[in-house]
Image (cartoon, grey):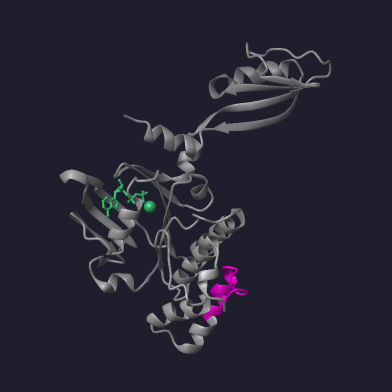
């Protein structure tokens, strides 16, 4: 059984003047238990639509979705899920503590456990100091953190998070990554969307890229990273200040006795052979790779 599965999942919206918007075109996706999956795509690609379909908040035009083998149209499918919607908004006269307690109570948790878990998640998300204040006084980042806290309180096995890092400062983003890695260590499944490639690099097992309602790539992050090495920046230190060319490659820049060369993968052996033969000191070799941002752009720009 898959943690999350979609088969031929489609969603059409009615647009202006009788037009139709194909927000999602036949999505087939299988997410394993214990897997962290990053759902990456630009704004308007269909990420939130997919998530709403999986959560049973929208009805598909065609196809099916399920969570832990239970069809998304059933309430049962949502019992083992922590869900963070895009732009979460809460009853803002409640305090974070009241709200998290309310959410936990919906999952029929025993009261002493609920109290302990509420305390745990409020502390984990750095909301402990503010826990008694009404949420109307919270910053956007704090509201986002309450949104995450309410996914954690009942300790579900599957997490579906729509842009969990959005609206957070760098410390907040790092905290969310930490929480996702924690969940992964504990064998939980996390499916999260983002339009920022940096968000997926350190935390995901696999990444799916969605563009204009179609899944254009699914792969392990490390495969994308490994296949992306394009060349090397080699820093050479010369005894005499005269910098030279090697294998016909001229330095990009020279500062003092050090010169920096861009060497493509195919030229690397010849370049290093000449450097070694000349007895020049190699100060540093940096790998230049095609990063996920470029990978993503290359897919987006495909006709
Ligand atoms: N309720 C709706 N009615 C009409 N069009 C919609 C609706 N919701 C989303 N869309 C359209 O569907 C496409 C995908 O939107 P969305 O899933 O929100 O993208 P993402 O979350 O990747 O930014 C967009 O073109 C958007 O304008
Ligand atoms: Mg969205």
Indicate the quadrant containing the C terminus: top left, top right, bottom left or bottom right.
top left
- Residue 122 spot, x, y in % from top left: 56, 73
Residue extending farthest bottom = 111
- Residue 164 spot, x, y in % from top left: 47, 58
Indicate the quadrant containing the N terminus: top left, top right, bottom left or bottom right.
bottom left
**Depicted 184 relative to depicted 297: above or below:** below
Name the residue: 67% across, 30% down. Answer: 285
**Depicted 287 relative to depicted 30: above or below:** above
Count the marks: how many? 0
Query: In the image, is residue 102 part of the stretch drawn in magenta?
Result: no
- Residue 80 spot, x, y in % from top left: 36, 72
Residue extending farthest left = 18
- Viewed as shown, does residue 139 lie left or right of 242? left
> Foreground: 143 or 246?
143
Residue 84 in sight:
yes
Name the residue: 27% across, 66% down. Answer: 69
> Foreground: 291 or 53?
53
- Residue 157 spot, x, y in % from top left: 41, 69
Name the residue: 46% across, 52% down. Answer: 205
- Viewed as shown, does residue 282 lie left or right of 18? right
Residue 20 in sight:
no
**Depicted 233 relative to depicted 15: above or below:** above
> Foreground: 194 or 130?
130
Magenta residues span: 117-131
Q: What is the quadrant of residue 296 in the picture?
A: top left
């Amino acid at each position: 059984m898959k943690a999350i599965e979609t088969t031929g999942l489609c969603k059409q919206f009615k647009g202006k003047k009788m037009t139709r918007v194909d927000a999602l075109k036949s999505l087939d996706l299988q997410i394993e238990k214990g897997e962290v999956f990053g759902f990456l795509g630009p704004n308007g690609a269909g990420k939130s639509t997919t998530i709403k379909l999986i959560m049973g908040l929208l009805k598909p035009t065609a196809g099916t979705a399920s969570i832990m083998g239970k069809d998304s149209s059933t309430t049962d499918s949502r019992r083992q899920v922590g869900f963070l919607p895009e732009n979460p908004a809460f009853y803002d006269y409640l305090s974070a503590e009241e709200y998290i307690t309310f959410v936990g109570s919906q999952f029929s948790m025993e009261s002493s456990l609920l109290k302990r878990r509420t305390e745990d998640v409020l502390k984990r998300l750095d909301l402990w100091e503010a826990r008694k204040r009404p949420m109307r006084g919270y910053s956007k980042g704090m509201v986002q953190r309450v949104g995450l806290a309410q996914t954690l309180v009942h300790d579900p096995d599957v997490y579906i998070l729509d842009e969990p890092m959005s609206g957070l400062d760098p410390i907040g983003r790092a905290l969310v990554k930490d929480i996702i890695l924690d969940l992964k260590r504990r064998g939980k499944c996390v499916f999260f969307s983002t339009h920022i490639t940096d968000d997926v690099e350190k935390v995901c097992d696999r990444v799916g890229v969605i563009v204009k309602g179609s899944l254009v790539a699914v792969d392990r992050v490390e495969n994308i990273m490994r296949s992306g090495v394009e060349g090397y920046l080699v820093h050479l230190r010369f005894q005499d200040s005269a910098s030279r060319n090697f294998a016909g490659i001229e330095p990009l820049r020279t500062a003092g006795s050090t010169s920096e060369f861009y060497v493509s993968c195919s030229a690397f052996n010849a370049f290093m052979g000449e450097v070694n033969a000349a007895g020049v000191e190699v100060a540093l070799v940096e790998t230049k790779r095609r990063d996920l941002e470029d990978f993503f752009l290359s897919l987006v720009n495909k006709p």
